[in-house]
Amino acid sequence: MPPSEIQELDSRTVERIAAGEVVERPASAVKELLENAIDADASRVTVAVESGGTESIRVSDDGIGMSEPALKQAIKEHTTSKIGDIEDLESGVATLGFRGEALHAIGAVSRMTITSRPRGGGRGTELVVEGGDVTSVEPAGCPEGTTVELEDLFYNVPARRKYLKQESTEFDHVNRIVTNYALANPDVAITLEHDGRETFATNGTGDLRETVLSVYGREVAESMIELAPEDVDDGPLDGISGLVSHPETNRASREYCSTFVNGRYVTANTVRDAVFEAYGAQLAPDRYPFAVVFLDVDPANVDVNVHPRKLEVRFAAEEAVSEQIESAVESALLREGLLRSNAPRG
Ligand code: ADP
Ligand code: MG
């Protein structure tokens, strides 16, 4: 019998429900930890997962690190060093994170160990959180920067744990996230390891084509065409840059088209479709190019705050944005003599 009165949920239950909103699966924890590392000015980040992230996830960075008091503060609910109030948010956030909920949420649904030492001096600290409780805080010998290790994600949320997919599927999601953050941040050397084996490692030189080489291999890197400033017409976007592949280098999946708005990885069908449109009849209907497309837009004309986990964005002028992107990609392909006809796709 369900209880018939309206009751207030206890704080533990509320916490786990809220955590489930932020952390849906291993890849969402990886995303949050990777964003924190990049926000912490890291030049090197290693993501190592076991069994697709279902057994363990470790993210190490050489960023600014945290002192013991900062670390204790960081794991509380809604604590952030990144924004002060809603006005900061409206004027556009420079950091990837700003909600201040990730570490708290992840700590509520896993066994989490954070080791951190502030850059430029200070002691190292190791803090352990189990299912939302801080179980130990101790001095630790560790390099500058931060390592967050999670074990047994969702051990205390059996329903969620049960719905995790096969390890290989969970790893596909992790790989997609890390790949996209690596492409968005060519100046950060990002390594991904799965079950002790390296999946890829970027070199952090800042060169996008080299980053593409590290994540997608030589064939793709060599086929990439640059979107040059002269390819971009006036429109709602202040800039469009990046690389798109030769039409012959294609796959049967839309997932190799990565889009970034003001440096932030987003899944925007508007943008992807505009890129694909530009290829017209050069691609069979079920084939898609590789693309890494960076859009610069006035923060007032885009809402990135749609959903914490879904990576969605909304543009003020969808249609005009699409046209501007399609025309930029078209003009890059034309410049390379890769568009034979203007026949519409299909
Ligand atoms: P947010 O990223 O939205 O601020 P988080 O819960 O992800 O919220 O992190 C809380 C705070 O902990 C951050 O604002 C930052 O000050 C600190 N922090 C988290 N991860 C790191 C890291 N890898 N290096 C340095 N500081 C970190
Ligand atoms: Mg964060």
Image (cartoon, rainbow, N blue to C red):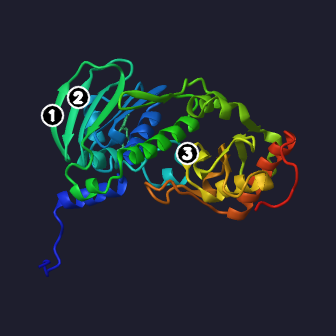
Q: Amino acid at mark 2?
A: Glu
Q: Do callouts 2 and 1 mark residues in contact (Cβ within 8 Å)?
A: yes
The mark found on residue 15 in the picture is none
Q: Quadrant of residue 214?
A: top right
Rendering coords of residue 322 (x, y %)? 72, 58
Q: Secondary structure at mark 3?
A: strand
Question: How crowded is the residue under tag 1: few (<14 C-alpha within 10 Å), some, or many (20+)?
Answer: few
Looking at the image, tell me whether mark 2 or mark 1 is earlier in sequence order.
Answer: 2
Rendering coords of residue 40 (x, y %)? 43, 33
- What residue do we see at 53% from left, 55% from top? 304
Q: Is residue 53 above or below residue 145?
A: below
Q: Amino acid at mark 3?
A: Arg
Residue hosting label 1 = 136
Rendering coords of residue 11 (x, y %)? 18, 59
- What residue do we see at 83% from left, 41% from top? 230
| Camera-nearest residue between 316 and 30 | 30
The answer to whether residue 15 shows anywhere in this view is: no
Looking at the image, tell me whether mark 1 or mark 3 is earlier in sequence order.
Answer: 1
C-alpha span from label 1 to label 3: 35 Å
| Camera-nearest residue between 206 and 77 | 206
Residue hosting label 2 = 126
Q: Secondary structure at mark 1?
A: strand
Considering every residue shown, the one lying at the far bottom of the view is: 4
Question: How crowded is the residue under tag 3: few (<14 C-alpha within 10 Å), some, or many (20+)?
Answer: many
The answer to whether residue 172 shows anywhere in this view is: yes
Residue hosting label 3 = 264
